[in-house]
Image (spheres, rainbow, N blue to C red):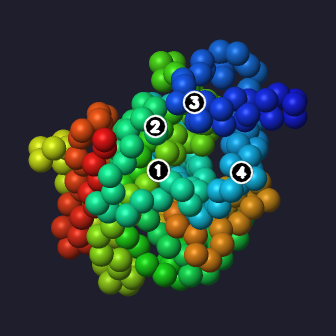
Amino acid sequence: MLEKAQIESIADELVQADRDRTILPKLTSRYPGMEIEDSYAIQKVWSDRRIEAGARLVGHKIGLTSKVMQVATGISEPDYGVIHDDMVHESGAVIEFDRFSNVRIEVELAFVLSKPLSGPNVTIFDVLDATAYVVPALEILNSHLELEGRTIVDTISDNAAMGAMVVGGRPVRVDETDLRWASALLYRNETIEDSGVAGAILGHPALGVAWLANKLAQHGQTLEAGEIILAGSFTKPMWVERGDTVHADYNGLGSVTCRFV
């Protein structure tokens, strides 16, 4: 476990790395005794620093929701990060590529809550009841730590690689469609690069939101009405470069597009 001063120092390093667009050495190579709870503590201080500087908390993201990714990273549950207001873009956005590091895209669904969700005993039925609507979204992954050899401890500290999101398409109520079968084709510059179905997210994307509410309860936090929750990716991370146009076609749920300049 890390000391409080170490946690605050690491969080400040990550704040500065975000400002300077720099890549830091892996935290686990410098602090081999780090644990997952240290990582969430670092993330919380990092988020608080940004909020003190004027950002506003508007939601959370869930990562590592597929069994394949959990096995690959040696964990048994997902992870989470925070979403601030300056991370949210509308479909059609032109996004500054240099704002991010190690830029990748994932295809997701976003849940917008109409009621609070407080763990530790939140179920999928609670999530469905508390959801105002679900809408297509892209997540832009942004890593301030070197990728080679990183662990889940590194990733969580770095806000679970959450950089930004692009939201669009057609909002739907949870009783309008079977969310397990929501699917998407992911294009880069008019070429299909990947596809997926939302049932890959823990069997049902709402289960990810239930996990998040229960995990946050362990840290004394709750999901509030109005929050937007990125429920997890159902495609592999796709690398993008400056000049790329990204388009995700969700069939009956519409589409989401952004361009990097």
Contact, mark 2 vs mark 4 (Cβ under 8 Å): no
Q: Position of residue 177 (x, y in %)?
A: 31, 78
Contact, mark 3 vs mark 2 (Cβ under 8 Å): no
The residue under label 2 is 100
Reading the chain from its start, which is encountered first: label 3 or label 1? 3
Q: Is residue 213 left or right of residue 147?
A: right
Contact, mark 2 vs mark 1 (Cβ under 8 Å): yes
The residue under label 1 is 164
Contact, mark 3 vs mark 4 (Cβ under 8 Å): no
Q: Amino acid at mark 2?
A: Phe
- Quadrant where the image shows the N terminus: top right
Q: CA distance from mark 3 to mark 1?
A: 17 Å
The residue under label 4 is 53
Question: Relative to 211, is 115 above or below?
Answer: below
Which mark is in front, 2 or 4? 4
* Residue at x-position 24% and y-position 38%: 243
Classify mark 2: helix, strand or loop: loop
Q: CA distance from mark 2 to mark 1?
A: 9 Å
Q: Amino acid at mark 1?
A: Ala
Question: Relative to 174, is 43 above or below?
Answer: above
Classify mark 3: helix, strand or loop: helix
Q: Position of residue 115 (x, y in %)?
A: 61, 81
Number of residues whose C-alpha sits closer than 10 Å to that of mark 2, classed few (under 14), some (14–19) or many (20 or more):
many
Q: CA distance from mark 4 to mark 1?
A: 18 Å
Q: CA distance from mark 3 to mark 4?
A: 16 Å
The residue under label 3 is 20
